[in-house]
Amino acid sequence: MATEVADSHGHGDVDYNAPYLTAGKGIKSWLLTVDHKRIGVMYLISVILAFFMGGMFALLVRLELFAPGRTIMSAEYYNRAFTLHGAIMVFLFIIPSVPGALGNFVLPIMLGTKDVAFPKINLLSFYIYVIGATFSLYSIISGSVDTGWTFYTPYSTTSNTSVVSMVLGVFILGFSSILTGLNFIVTVHKLRAPGLHWNRLPLFVWGMYATSIIQVLATPVLAITLLLLAAERTMGLGIFDPALGGDPVLFQHFFWFYSHPAVYIMIVPGMAIVSELLATFSRRAIFGYFAVAMSSLGLALLGFLVWGHHMFTSGQSEFSTMLFSGLTMLVAIPSGVKVFNWTATLYKGSIALTTPMLYALAFLVLFTIGGLTGLFLGALNTDIHLHDTYFVVAHFHYVMMGGTVIAFVGGILYWWPKITGKMYDEKMAKVSWFFVVVGFNVTFLIQFIMGSKGMPRRYYDYLPQFEIYHKVSTVGSWMLLVGFLILAGVLVKSLKSGPKAPPNPWGSAGYEWQGTESPPVFQNFRETPTITRGPYDYHLCTEAELFDGFPEDAPKEG
Amino acid sequence: METLQLPPQWSTFARQTDWVFYFIYYLSVAFFVAICAAMVYFVWKYRRKPGVMSEPSGHNNLLEIGWTVSPLVLLVFLFHVGYRGYVDLTMPPADAMEIRVRARKWAWDFEYANGGHATVLHVPVHRPVKLILSSEDVIHSLYIPAFRVKRDAVPGYYSTMWFEATQTGETDFFCTEYCGAAVGTSEYREGDPNVGREGDRRHTGHFSMIGRVKIETRAEFSTFLESILRPPTDPATGREVSPEVWGSLIYRSSQCNTCHSIDGSAMTGPSWRGLFGRSREFVDGTNRVADANYLRESILQPNAHVVRGFNGVMPSFAGTLRDQQIDALIAYIRTLR
Ligand SMILES: [Cu+2]
Ligand SMILES: [Cu+2]
């Protein structure tokens, strides 16, 4: 198997046993690589850039709202700023973030394989991402977009901004997402190392697997919808615009048929990371492993049945409204199962409060708030009051940012030593954690109150009674900025002068730590691994194994 | 009653909705505190100590089935109470008073049974009111927080909502479906101290599609109904105001002021200052003098002649403004020398 996979890489000139970062030299060896680790790193850099760009627009939006009336920009530009914030964060950052960056890097190693099933398609999916991102960003300079990331018709078919290029960008990005999903599904099914039974799969892999299923099934619907939208705009086809005989609410059905499952494309990977972090830093298997794994699949499935909860005020029939409300309530079950099992994992563990663990715990708290506030939006009469207010804005930021982004940062720090071979400054990382978590809550907690008081979302200007809430929220966004800047400093410093990382700095029983060096060699393992125990079997590990799963001075084989 | 979280309860729905809200709220707080307490306690109690290993974990079927199934009871209950409230929200009583609501970028028009129009939503207290909504352009949504009601106005559909106010007073309504902003208007706002202030809300967009709800006693409400058909009376003289003054009031109440200034500065539409009698040039290259007939046509069929340098975005006021009101507007424009 070793030679087979090595051949498929098609690089005769690389040293398969050199660390992957230096196994090939020059920019070409990166841009044309089919190594899942390098592709993961390229994704990581891209999504971090996207995050900073989306973040800048968020800061502009918050700054504009610091005072009523015009603060720094006109209404026109405000509408573009929040649209770009949403679109960039959703399509260029969150959706590709965890699968593209961490999934690509870690998943094959966890499976004990040398690469994903289709390494070249993997590279293709990265380039499709780059092309899609280019289209989307082109829309910024060619007139920008002011439709909101949801592109509701008939506003989006009549807006005279650059909607088509943004929509085409998102359409293209979808293919990248589909290909990544496909690759992961096949990899999980076909390339598990000997001994890696389904019930020994790390929960990160289960999460990625569930995510991939949603990506493959839901994304085509978005593609069709956006294509129809583009066709309506360019050719005057009457599908959504009532002026042309179309139905605007149909667009909402189509759009949310993708975009609600997409919520799980975004959050399930976050949950997947958190399961790994909690296990490693409590030195304990995730309590109720099977239930946690199945709840990811449960969320993936339920996610397809609840899209109508975005449309309770839209005029869909009362009967569908009732069904969607009932089904939405059910989402609380798998989410609750996860939260309970994670908490129970801490019980009788051996808990180390490293920065990744702090991020995992923050996730637990923030995701719980995000999930519980979802109940207000699933129950019908309260949703009628809260729909399209800041309450909703706060709710999904608790899930998307307090959930996925926090978990993603935790995951980056956790796997950082494996990815870069360098350690980072724990103390400063904790400082950044503090600013990020406090800043996040200052920004968004108050938005729940503002929203339930009646402040609508996407407003450039507001009535005087809302001023205090907006002020506090904007100040929170500055704290977030400080937190992320410190974090960026920590990571840059680690790259420059961080101490060399041992193979298993956290003492994890996970196979990616026990079976590889930091950073891993080009072909991940020096010999085809055989898995003999589960990823969380701390009770089977000796103290020495935990810390030196792969001692660097051990004689190198292969 | 106004609490930290919610606006005052001014409709018959408010109490039920708030009951559900606070039920979920306290449930969530209890749950959240329990989870956090457990977490903090475990993290402290089982912090890593030298020589102390973690205990193997596994699963516990009883416990796990318990916390998978038992929330179901609460969820079904929540769904039930939420749905019950929703059913009330969607079933207006047969004798409800109807008001026709038309939304367009970026204003609301309320038409009453007697044919009169208003931009402030006047409703009688203690009487079911049914709104029939539609939109002329994109989707809008009417939201009255104090009543806990909201409904989208979708082009090509009629949608309805209803409420019964329980108290007289004034409150706000909002548009909650994003509907854009006027392009270019803000350039003229540079350094304008009035930007965003009440009274002179001259920049327009989704955020300015808001207004006041006036809940009135029966007597006040019938006076209102009469007033929307005739020029208002001047309190000083006790007589109806002149057409010019009425026109200036309509200029504001029909929200012509969101696009037309009277001081010569161009906004989304041309300024009215010095308009009357001036020669107008149109995008199709033709010319015409702005006389009464032209002004009338501009109001009823704005796109018949689009003034050069502007876009044909003005909505038609046919069916919205009555003849006398158009006359009053023309009389007012004549005064703007
Ligand atoms: Cu949803
Ligand atoms: Cu609107």
Image (tube, helix red, strand yellow):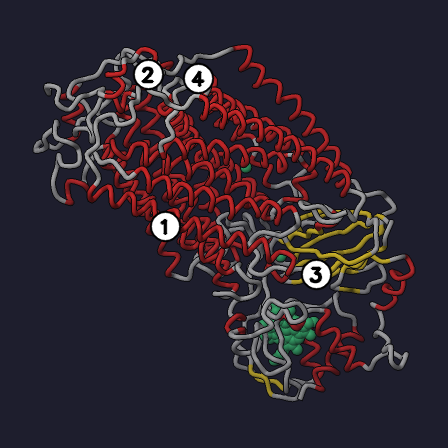
Which percent across, then down, holds residue B127? 86, 49
Tags 2 and 4 both on a single chain: no
* Residue occupied by mark 4: A348
Which percent across, then down, holds residue A365? 50, 33
**Mark carried by residue B211:** 3
* Residue occupied by mark 1: A52
Q: Amino acid at mark 2?
A: Gly
**Which sits in the foreground, A182 or A493?**
A493
SS at badge 4: loop
* Residue occupied by mark 2: B51
The nearer-to-camera label among 1 and 2 is 2
Q: Residue at x 54, y 25 (%)?
A: A336
SS at badge 3: strand
**Which sits in the foreground, A536 or B156?**
A536
Pointer 4 local density, CA inside 10 Å: few below 14, some 14–19, many at least 20 = many
Of marks 3 and 2, which one's residue comes earlier in the chain? 2
